[in-house]
Image: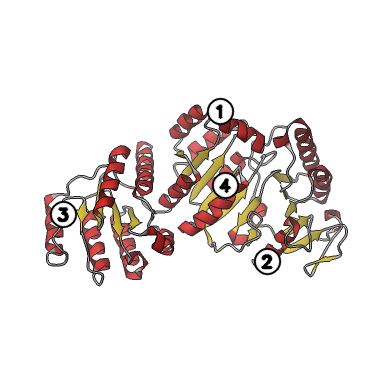
């Protein structure tokens, strides 16, 4: 069957008022136990219905032999049982009127003809009552606003609701986007691992998050599209309003073969997808690391107004690395106007040791620790007037609340991004997270920062060409 081309209302998937755990267990080391335990520990406010034919009570909750025995309505069923039993359970969900079912179970179209038939039976059973399917062969969802986490149920996530949405055709990608993204300072409106996308597809979630007022950036890991034309049409409509970032797997012949055995996906022509994506305003990533870097970049409320960079550093080697990266990316580090240089010269007089001058890059050599935050902030304030974005390498001061507030103010006054690279990222991980959460993108390495800034610049150009600058 062909999936529906009209996106369903997915609110009850991400904000379920009740959840049935099919395959519920007392054992927290089993998935059916982890799901219930996580919901309870995270303070899920809806009703939880454990489904287990052998238990009358699980974790102090009344257990039911079947979803058909549950007295109330069920918004979401989470199914974690062997694949052969899933079609029957799905039929019961359909009869009960369950709105959505996340099928964690594996053993479907990713395994060949027999699995495809089982997946067909699953979908046919679900459609008898209008139950919509996420998966099978997936990890499910994380909805911070609803305190629902089926992707990493074995750990408490220190994530707050935010504006980044992630849709991943891989549990691994979804798990790492959650962990690594949170560590970098990203906050999520929703994360979904969709697996085989037998029913609900990537396109459905693009449309949902595109219309969701809480979502500001949409990121994807994609192996194959079921409705490529619809995806590109939606991207064309949504990308002028929200950045869309796509890491497309299967760029090599071997990768495409692995994608077919992983989620039963046909990877398609990678070069054609890349070309079409650029036309529709999609930003491409080549790895999970870059996908996260780009999500961090687009968490900044402003895009560059052009490709002129103001570079302020306290590390000569870092300035060389950034200059090389900018040259490759088509970004300019041009001498600052004479009046701006003069302002810098007057401000820095007697504040720092002898330095190479205020042309650009501006290398402070060494800023006294007791004045470093003030010196950096004031220099950036002066430079921001003459460039399209600012990039700085600084030591220790990212943790300074006054400094971060000052950067926010300079950014907002000039409506230009300020990007920070800590001089020692190992010791400043937590500081990097704090800066990113405040819309000041931070990166451990110069090359990552420049790649992200180049993507921001390309998006700004795309919007200008649409007349939306």
Q: Which residue is mark 1?
A: 253
Q: Is residue 323 left or right of residue 242?
A: left
What's the distance in space between the residues labelled 3 and 1, CA to CA? 50 Å
Mark toward the viewer: 2 or 4: 4
Q: Are marks 3 and 4 in contact (CB under 8 Å)?
A: no
What's the distance in space between the residues labelled 3 and 4, CA to CA? 44 Å
Q: Which mark is residue 358?
A: 3
**Lower sequence index among marks 1 and 2:** 2
**Residue 172 visible here:** yes
**Lower sequence index among marks 3 and 4:** 4
**Lower sequence index among marks 4 and 1:** 4
Q: Secondary structure at mark 3?
A: loop
Residue at image location 40% in from the left, 58% down from the top: 439
333 or 62: nearer the viewer: 333
What's the distance in space between the residues labelled 1 and 2, CA to CA? 47 Å
The colour scheme is secondary structure
What's the distance in space between the residues labelled 4 and 1, CA to CA? 20 Å
Q: Is residue 110 left or right of residue 82?
A: left
Give x and y (percent) for residue 282: 46, 38
Q: Which residue is mark 4?
A: 173
**Lower sequence index among marks 2 and 4:** 2
Give x and y (percent) for residue 160: 53, 62
Q: Are marks 1 and 2 in contact (CB under 8 Å)?
A: no
**Lower sequence index among marks 3 and 2:** 2
Q: Secondary structure at mark 1?
A: helix
Q: Residues within 10 Å of mark 1 (few under 14, many from 20)?
A: few
Residue at image location 50% in from the left, 45% down from the top: 288
């Amino acid at each position: 069957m062909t999936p529906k081309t009209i996106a369903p209302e997915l609110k009850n998937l991400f904000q379920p008022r009740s959840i049935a755990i099919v395959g519920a267990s007392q054992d927290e080391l089993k998935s059916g136990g982890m799901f219930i335990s996580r919901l309870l520990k995270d303070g899920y406010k809806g009703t939880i219905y454990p489904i287990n034919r052998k238990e009358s009570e699980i974790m102090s909750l009344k257990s039911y032999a079947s979803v058909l025995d549950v007295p109330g309505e069920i918004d979401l069923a989470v199914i974690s049982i062997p694949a052969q039993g899933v079609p029957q359970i799905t039929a019961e969900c359909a009869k009960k009127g369950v709105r959505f079912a996340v099928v964690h179970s594996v053993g479907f179209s990713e395994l060949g003809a027999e699995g495809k038939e089982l997946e067909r039976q699953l979908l046919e059973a679900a459609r008898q009552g209008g139950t919509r399917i996420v998966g099978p062969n997936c990890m499910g969802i994380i909805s911070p606003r609803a305190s629902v986490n089926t992707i990493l149920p074995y750990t408490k996530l220190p994530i707050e609701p935010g504006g980044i949405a992630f849709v991943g055709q891989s549990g691994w990608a979804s798990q790492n986007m959650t962990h690594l993204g949170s560590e970098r300072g990203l906050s999520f409106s929703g994360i979904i691992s969709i697996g085989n996308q037998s029913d609900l597809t990537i396109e459905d979630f693009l449309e949902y998050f595109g219309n969701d007022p809480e979502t500001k950036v949409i990121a994807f890991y994609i192996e194959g599209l079921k409705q490529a034309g619809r995806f590109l049409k939606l991207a064309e409509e949504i990308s002028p309003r929200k950045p869309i970032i796509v890491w497309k797997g299967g760029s090599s012949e071997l990768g495409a073969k692995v994608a077919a055995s992983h989620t039963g996906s046909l990877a398609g022509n990678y070069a054609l997808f890349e070309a079409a994506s650029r036309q529709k305003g999609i930003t491409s990533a080549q790895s999970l690391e870059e996908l996260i870097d780009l999500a961090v970049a687009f968490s900044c409320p402003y895009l560059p107004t052009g490709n002129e960079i103001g570079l302020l550093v306290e590390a000569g080697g870092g300035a060389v690395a950034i200059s090389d990266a900018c040259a490759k990316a088509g970004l300019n580090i041009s001498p600052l106007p004479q009046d701006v240089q003069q302002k810098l010269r007057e401000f820095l007089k007697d504040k720092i040791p002898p330095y190479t001058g205020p042309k650009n890059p501006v290398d402070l050599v060494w800023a006294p620790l007791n004045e470093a935050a003030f010196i950096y902030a004031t220099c950036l304030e002066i430079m921001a007037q003459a460039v399209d974005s600012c990039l700085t390498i600084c030591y220790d001061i990212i943790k300074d609340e006054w400094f971060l507030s000052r950067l926010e103010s300079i950014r907002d006054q000039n409506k230009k991004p300020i990007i920070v690279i800590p001089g020692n990222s190992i010791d400043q991980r937590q500081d990097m997270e704090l800066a990113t959460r405040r819309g000041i993108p931070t990166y451990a390495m110069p090359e990552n920062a420049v790649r992200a800034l180049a993507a921001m610049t390309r998006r700004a150009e795309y919007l200008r060409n649409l007349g939306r600058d």
